[in-house]
Image: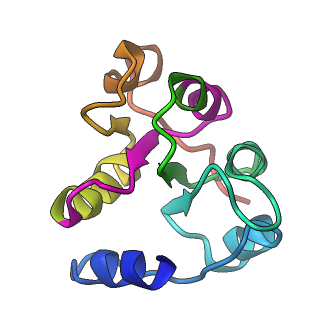
Amino acid sequence: MRGGIRMILESDPDIEVVAEDDGANAVDLVNRHRPDVVRTDIQMPTVGGLEVTERVTALAGAPAVAVLTTFDLDEYVYSVLRNGAVGFLLKDTPPRELAGAVHVVAGGARRCSHHTSPPNCWRPSHGEPRRRAPGP
């Protein structure tokens, strides 16, 4: 699955996948590569996406976090948004929309799959685009 997602994302000339991980090294990889967006999943082999989201968004200069998952449950949407994610997409999202979502969340706005969306997912946090803290 991971290779297919990478291929979809890298088919967009403005997207470069700089690292892949099972969650255990996410913070180290973010600090090393300084990505604009981190893509995670609810369930991962080592550290789950909820915890990865919380860890990554707590960093100074944190990248936007988007969750791509098969779990279409409102409780997951609310949990990842509370933990700082700005995107929640299902794995059946069409490839063009997936790449587009990366651009949307990198620009500071929220993006959720059409059939998943609690109402607050479609609006930026507190009515303002997400702004990243300045980096070190």
Coloring basis for residues:
rainbow
Horizontally, is 90 left or right of 26 in the view?
A: left
Can residue 21 be seen at all in this image of the molecule?
yes
For this rendering, which residue is in front, 70 or 28? 70
Q: For the magenta stretch, what is the residue range?
A: 78-95
Specify the quadrant of the image occupied by residue 132.
Answer: top right
Residue 43 covered by magenta stretch: no
Whether residue 16 is visible here, answered yes or no, is no
The single residue placed furthest to the left in the displayed view is 96
Per the image, is 87 magenta? yes
Q: Could you tell me which quadrant the C terminus lies in?
A: bottom right
Quadrant hosting residue 81: top right
Q: Position of residue 131 (x, y in %)?
A: 49, 38
- Residue found 48% across the figure and 62% down from its top: 36
Taking depth in this image into account, of 133 and 126 the one nearest to the observer is 126
- Name the spot of residue 58 as percent of width and height, x first: 76, 44
